[in-house]
Amino acid sequence: MEFEAKQIDAMSKLVSEENIECDWTVTRACDAYIEPEIAAEAKASYEQRCADGGNVSDIHEIPPDDYISVTRVKNVLYGVTFTGASIHPYKLVHHLLNKCVEKGMNLQTNTCVSSATRLPSGEWSIVTSRGTLKASKVIFATNAYTADIVPVLNDKIVPIPGTVCRIIPSINYMLSPLEMTYSIRSNGHNFDYMIPRQIGDRSIILGGAKRTYMYNRKIFYNNCDDSMEFINETSKMYLEEFMPKHFHNWGNDQNGCKQMWTGILGFTSDLLPFVGELPDQSNGYVIAGFNGQGMPRILLCARALVDLVLGRIDKIEELIPEPYIITKNRLETKENYLLDRIATQSDLTHTS
């Protein structure tokens, strides 16, 4: 938690120093729990953290009498807020890429990599759609697609489709806009996330709806098709009905979803990212598999990996949580918590 919290200060500093126009907004984030079992688990977890002496100075429990007034979410059974942020990631990446190109980086777009092989010399051979090249060191920052070119990560990092929509606020919420980011948490491991934009039309970016398709392994697991506007009709209806269903006094406005799209997330078998040098494949480095939680993790993970690649540090665990580090043990374990979650969701779907 503390590592993720550090990302906000690091990103604020980066955006300020580089003068990046990317809609960076520091605000409060709200976790709202709307089903009894997970609400009880969340409260118990917070109380245990307090008992263990953990830092909870930025985690504010919402008083039960204030659930609706603070969260504006119906049927909240438990809620907390903490410092959060939102950003326009494309604008951020576009700015940084432009700066790197200005400094001499050779950026090759529309160039598919089909394989990467470590040679006996210690160099790497990279086969692309436009020819083969050699490199002394390679960083695989290919997230969901990493296993296609790093076979040792097969079944360790898998592509998972996600679906997102843009919603125009109702009249009531135009007059009194949402200011926090949200995670609306329901049964099992399901949650839906929201980023109310604080500029322009103040549209709301809503993503999730995994409960509508996670139980279907063929759709959910190892699927890199992002050509769909939405995953299925059920997920489309879920997102269209979400705001009036869950937000107090939304009203009868029919604006609804203006856009829907899908994207591919890199999920891992143990639900933690892989960062560091590939075991037994020196000079090959990975930063991938962020399980849909890249924004509060990637920046400082990337900085740590660059320090390792450039020899500024000897051990990456000095800078990132040890469970993130790619190890032989993580690669060899047969456990797959992601498949377990799919099985659990299937049970929940067929018993609810």
Image (spheres, grey):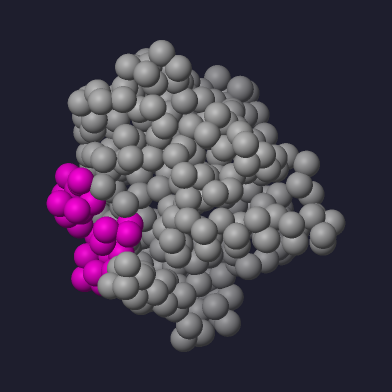
Q: Quadrant of residue 257?
A: top left
- Name the residue rendered at 84%, 56% in the picture: 53
Pinpoint residue 222: horizontal percent, then vertical percent: 28, 68
At 79% from the left and 49% from the top, the residue drawn is 55
Query: What percent of the width, then of the height, locates residue 167?
Result: 29, 30
**Circle count:** 0
Please name the residue shown 58% across and 75% down the image.
327
Is 71 part of what is drawn in magenta?
A: no
On the question of residue 183 being in view, the answer is no
Residue 15 shown left or right of residue 126 in the figure: right
State the image quarter where residue 217 is shown.
bottom left
User: Which one is nearer the viewer's eye here, 44 or 222?
Assistant: 44
Where's residue 3, x and y in %?
68, 50
Residue 294 in the image: above or below residue 188: above
The residue closer to the viewer here, 42 or 331, is 42
Vertical arrangement, residue 162 with respect to residue 239, above or below: below
Residue 222 within the magenta-colored segment of the rendering = yes
Q: Position of residue 115 (x, y in %)?
A: 31, 67
In the foreground, 149 or 335:
335
* Image quarter in which the C terminus is found: bottom left
The stretch in magenta equals 210-237
The reply, left or right, for residue 263 in relation to residue 28 is left
Q: Residue at x 60, y 62 (%)?
A: 41
Task: For residue 21, say whether it is visible.
Answer: yes
Position of residue 211 relative to residue 84, above or below, is below
Closer to the camera in the image, 178 or 265:
178
| Displayed quadrant of residue 47 | bottom right
**Left or right, 221 with reference to 318:** left
